[in-house]
Image: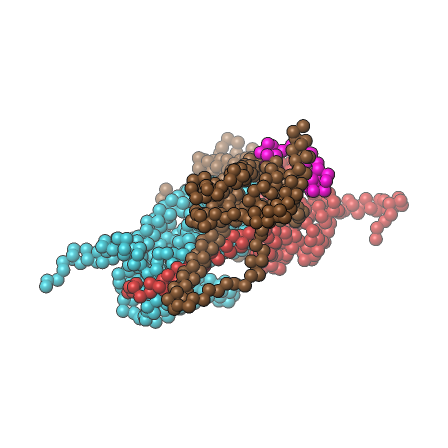
């Protein structure tokens, strides 16, 4: 037999990942089952991330009815929503908390799918779509944070964008100006102002949701076609039907999540964790308050940047991105035990840097 | 040691003292000593949270400058109100100082500028001097306590998170109970439904295929 | 006249007939004291009618009774808004539930031939009366909201008046027709009670609460196994139904509470005119600040020189604030030799605006206490600020526009001031030009 041509290989790759033959009721609905084993609880994490995204879309739409995306009115419109609109404070608080919950569950989902080696053949495209969504979700957090136009909003955004510019010093002379150009393209003008706000608003409200919806559609289609991955080396053989048992359990998890979200949003204002100096409206002619730092989910990148030389962090981020995208091929021969250990280490790092990042910084830099 | 006002010599002495005090305070005005960073510094130290002049002032950077809410930008009428507020040595006067926010106004109204000057040497004493009854933003945490916690006494969504959690639970108790009841019904119902589905799954156990 | 009879006389007539009639019937015609169930004649549709009807109406009547017996407790229970919503919502759902069940019962009784055979005129009249009564109750709830709350102050005192032989229809005199008809309907049902099968109300099977469970023991193995699996299937079916029911009720309550929050949010705040005025004023102030900023920016974009002050206005002890070409605050003093001294007022520590009062040749930044020398801009040792305030360049012109003195930023001072012509001199800042532009 002759070797397949390049076109045939590529075609074969995609037909294996998107088997049209499986697009029938029997395969997709009747026969679909979910394995039950020690790590079965992790199967619900992706669904929970999706649930919180749906909450974000709904609360975001409601917030959109009152928010004004101009430099002079953004902060005031958010204040009006919180102080005067009935249940406005609750909706805003739900949006803020749900953002953190969503990112938390996305990270947990990512760590567990890696540990369960769920990216094995033929699920590589599911994984790639997931990695793209991971970055998209961080972009959501970044762009949304600017919208209230408070001291922390603008200054934290400045901090992140300034770090993009720092890459320039490591590039060859011809490209050295490129990061600055990229930064100006993101900002829309030389310094953060109305152009930046308009841009970030459009990205946060339209571009990213559409992009995420498309990639999510691909991700879910792929999952439905291939079913839930095996998850463990030795399957127990116990199965539950996807329709309706697993779905009902998923719904139960979503209900519990909604309960927790509602109670938390009702009783603990998200703003109370920040010093009030950072919540004041941004004043370009005034002072920069102390304590500016990005949201907790950026700590794993922010604190290393504060503590280590820039090039180390740059290389690390680059390696991590490439590693994530190529994971299905890099770890093709890896055992689940190894992946679980890696995942555990990553989890440990995340927990330590998020909870104790500030203390570590104070310890190293001497306050 | 105060002179009684009946004695003529005493009267002259008192007037002289008042005149000297006036000149001294003018001098203090000239040297900008009407800004009190001691309180804001104490609040930040005691609570461990960053605090700025926005605690009492309209402008978060304080009264000096010509931004909004700062001295450089005041009309003569507004300057008159500022001086009136500075002249309120004793508590009880209604204060509407254009460079102070409602909390700043409240402080002067509650304790007077004389006591305020004394407290500069002991900023911790501001909290007991104000008392723990006033709560301008209505979040359930008294203003003096918010001063100690380094949170915004004019923002009902801002306060020590633990305290706000407990206060809001009590304030919204009915809502919380009904949410628990309604969610409890749904979760219990789903549990029953799921149990039946699992039972059906077990019946069909042998005929489903594995997923690799 | 009619109202007088309906609310003063009818209640007592109804109660008397109900009591006397029931006692007579129980004593004289004991075996007619039954609901005369037609289950053996037609059992399938009966379930769909009887269960919703009885469950619904019993719970509603229980709520009516609770309110009558303990109005204070009822009012307290209904004080929190979610409680009021939940109870009104449940009541509404139960009312529709029972009405639907009753409709099934009526249709069944009229259409099924076997059941027709045992139906009397009184049965039909009773069914009609019950249907009307529930419909009237539903109509009251739909047209006059929060009946659970306002009835404690109107119907409850009226009923207590009736029961204590001091009826006072003033409590319900002002009510709309649908509510009055509902009250009258109740008395009519009481009158009909001893003459119909509604008497089965009093045959409440309370002993069932303590009755020992019945166990059927089959003698044949086949029956035993069949019975066991049937029992298991029915058990799980019961759990499923209960589960679905509970989930639906919970879900309904959640939907109610959620919509209650959403509706006012979408409608927007209802502001008093004082609040509206306050908000407009703050908005106006903010827009004026934006206008000012943009005017400043325009001035700086258009002009090569911007006047800071007349030279005679500057003082060595009190600085004059102005905005420089970078839209940042700056201070102007009168320096040595009558020349101006301009420096940035943005503190190099964290950017607060530095104070303009000079003490001992220094100005103070009040945010974190930094002192800066006004001639050099250098902070005193011990200040949190470490970098000096930039010294700004300036230009002095006389009345005709001729340059008299100048200083380039970071450069030398040129020119001299003629004290005699001082009043005609003005201080300007110069637009910085970028490299290669």
In percent of width and height, residue C259 lies at: 50, 44
In percent of width and height, residue C282 lies at: 56, 38
Q: Nearer the viewer, residue B93 or A15?
A: A15
| Count of numbered badges drawn on the protein | 0
In percent of width and height, residue B150 lies at: 60, 55
Left or right: A143 in relation to A85? left
Q: Would you say residue C58 is visible in this rendering?
A: no
Assign the magenta stretch its main secondary structure.
helix
**Model colouring:** by chain
Q: Nearer the viewer, residue A70 or B26?
A: A70
Quick one: which residue is furthest to the right in this view? B7
Task: Write the residue at 71% across / 53% down.
Answer: B131
Q: Is residue C121 magenta?
A: no
Chain C visual colour: brown
Q: Would you say residue C5 is visible in this rendering?
A: yes
Left or right: A9 in relation to C112? left
Left or right: B9 in relation to C27? right
**Quarter of the rendering containing residue C20:** top right
Q: Is residue C177 magenta?
A: yes
Task: Write the residue at 50% across / 54% down.
Answer: B185
Q: Nearer the viewer, residue B63 or C184?
A: C184
In percent of width and height, residue C48 lies at: 45, 47
Q: Quadrant of the N terminus of chain C?
A: top right
Q: Quadrant of the C terminus of chain C?
A: top left
Chain B visual colour: red
Which stretch did the figure color magenta?
C156-183
Task: Write the residue at 43% across / 40% down.
Answer: C111
Chain A visual colour: cyan
Q: Is residue C119 above or below residue A263?
A: above
Task: Write the residue at 54% across / 47% down.
Answer: C35
């Amino acid at each position: 037999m002759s070797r397949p041509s390049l076109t045939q290989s590529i075609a074969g790759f995609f037909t294996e990942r998107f088997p049209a033959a499986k697009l029938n009721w029997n395969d997709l609905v009747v026969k679909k089952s979910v394995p039950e084993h020690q790590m079965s609880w992790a199967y619900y994490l992706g669904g929970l991330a999706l649930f919180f995204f749906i909450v974000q879309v709904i609360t975001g739409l409601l917030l959109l009815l009152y928010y004004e995306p101009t430099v002079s009115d953004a902060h005031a419109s958010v204040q009006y929503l919180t102080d005067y609109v009935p249940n406005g404070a609750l909706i805003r608080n739900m949006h803020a908390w749900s953002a953190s919950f969503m990112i938390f569950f996305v990270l947990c989902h990512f760590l567990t799918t890696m540990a369960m080696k769920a990216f094995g053949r033929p699920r590589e495209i599911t994984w790639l779509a997931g990695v793209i969504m991971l970055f998209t979700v961080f972009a959501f957090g970044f762009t949304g944070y600017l919208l209230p136009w408070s001291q922390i909003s603008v200054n934290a955004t400045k901090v992140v964008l300034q770090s993009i510019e720092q890459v320039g010093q490591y590039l060859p002379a011809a490209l050295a100006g490129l990061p600055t150009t990229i930064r100006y393209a993101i900002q829309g003008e030389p310094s953060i102002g109305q152009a930046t706000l308009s841009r970030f608003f459009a990205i946060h409200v339209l571009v990213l949701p559409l992009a995420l919806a498309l990639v999510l559609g691909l991700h879910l289609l792929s999952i439905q076609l291939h079913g839930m991955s095996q998850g463990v080396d030795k399957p127990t053989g116990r199965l539950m039907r996807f329709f309706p048992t697993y779905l009902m359990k998923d719904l139960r998890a979503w209900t519990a999540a909604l309960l927790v979200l509602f109670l938390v949003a009702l009783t603990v204002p998200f703003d109370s964790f920040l010093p009030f100096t950072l919540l004041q409206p941004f004043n370009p002619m005034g002072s920069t308050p102390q304590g500016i730092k990005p949201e907790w989910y950026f700590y794993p990148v922010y604190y290393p940047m504060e503590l280590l030389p820039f090039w180390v962090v740059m290389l690390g981020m680059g390696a991590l991105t490439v590693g994530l995208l190529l994971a299905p091929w890099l770890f093709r021969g890896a055992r689940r035990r190894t992946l679980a250990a890696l995942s555990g280490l990553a989890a440990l790092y995340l927990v330590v840097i998020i909870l104790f990042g500030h203390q570590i910084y104070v310890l190293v830099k001497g306050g | 040691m105060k002179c009684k006002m009946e004695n003529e010599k005493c009267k002259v002495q008192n007037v002289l003292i008042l005149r000297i005090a006036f000149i001294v305070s003018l001098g203090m005005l000239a040297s900008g000593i009407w800004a009190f960073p001691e309180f804001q510094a104490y609040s930040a130290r005691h609570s461990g949270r960053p605090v700025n002049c926005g605690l009492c002032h309209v402008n978060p950077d304080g009264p000096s400058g010509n931004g909004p809410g700062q001295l450089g930008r005041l009309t003569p009428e507004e300057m008159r109100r500022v001086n009136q507020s500075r002249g309120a040595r004793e508590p009880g006067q209604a204060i509407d100082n254009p460079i102070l926010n409602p909390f700043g106004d409240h402080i002067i109204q509650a304790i007077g500028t004389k006591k305020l000057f004394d407290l500069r040497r002991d900023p911790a004493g501001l909290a007991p001097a104000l008392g723990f009854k006033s709560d301008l933003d209505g979040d359930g945490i008294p203003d003096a306590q918010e001063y100690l916690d380094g949170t915004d006494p004019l923002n009902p969504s801002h306060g020590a998170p633990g305290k706000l959690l407990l206060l809001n639970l009590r304030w919204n108790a009915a809502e919380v109970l009904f949410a628990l009841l309604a969610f409890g019904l749904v979760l219990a119902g789903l549990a029953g439904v799921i149990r039946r589905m699992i039972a059906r799954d077990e019946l069909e156990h042998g005929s489903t295929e594995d997923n690799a | 006249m009619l109202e007088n009879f309906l609310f003063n006389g009818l209640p007592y007539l109804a109660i008397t007939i109900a009591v006397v009639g029931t006692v007579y019937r129980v004593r004289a015609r004991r075996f007619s004291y039954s609901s005369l169930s037609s289950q053996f004649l037609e059992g399938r549709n009966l379930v769909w009618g009887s269960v919703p009807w009885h469950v619904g109406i019993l719970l509603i009547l229980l709520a009516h009774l609770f309110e009558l017996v303990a109005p204070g407790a009822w009012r307290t229970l209904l004080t929190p808004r979610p409680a009021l919503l939940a109870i009104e919502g449940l009541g509404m759902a139960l009312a529709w539930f029972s009405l639907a069940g009753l409709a099934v019962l009526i249709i069944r009784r009229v259409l099924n031939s076997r059941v027709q055979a045992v139906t009397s005129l009184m049965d039909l009249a009773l069914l009609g009366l019950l249907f009307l009564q529930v419909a009237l109750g539903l109509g009251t709830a739909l047209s006059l909201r929060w009946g659970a709350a306002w009835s404690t102050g109107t119907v409850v005192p009226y009923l207590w008046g009736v029961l204590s032989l001091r009826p006072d229809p003033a409590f319900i005199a002002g009510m709309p027709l649908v509510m009055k008809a509902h009250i009258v309907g109740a008395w009519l049902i009481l009158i009909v009670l001893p003459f119909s099968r509604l008497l089965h109300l009093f045959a409440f099977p309370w002993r069932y609460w303590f009755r020992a469970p019945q166990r059927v023991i089959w003698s044949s193995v086949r029956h035993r196994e069949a019975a066991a699996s049937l029992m298991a299937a029915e058990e799980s079916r019961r759990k499923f139904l209960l589960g679905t029911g509970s989930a639906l009720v919970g879900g309904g309550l959640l939907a109610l509470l959620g919509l209650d929050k959403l509706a006012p949010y979408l409608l927007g705040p209802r502001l008093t005119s004082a609040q509206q005025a306050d908000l407009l004023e703050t908005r106006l102030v903010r827009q004026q600040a934006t206008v000012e900023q943009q005017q400043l920016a325009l001035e700086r974009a258009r002009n090569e020189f911007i006047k800071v002050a007349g030279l005679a206005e500057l003082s060595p002890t009190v600085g004059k604030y102005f905005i420089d070409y970078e839209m940042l605050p700056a201070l102007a003093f009168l320096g040595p030799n009558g020349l101006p001294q301009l420096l940035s007022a943005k503190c190099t520590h964290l950017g607060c605006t530095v104070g303009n009062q000079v003490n001992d040749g220094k100005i103070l930044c009040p945010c974190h206490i930094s002192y800066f020398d006004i001639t050099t801009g250098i902070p005193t040792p011990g200040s949190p600020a470490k970098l000096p305030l930039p010294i700004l360049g300036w230009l002095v012109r006389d009345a005709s526009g001729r340059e008299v003195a100048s200083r380039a930023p970071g450069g030398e001072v040129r020119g001299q001031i003629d004290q005699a012509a001082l009043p005609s001199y003005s201080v300007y800042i110069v637009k910085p030009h970028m490299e290669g532009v």
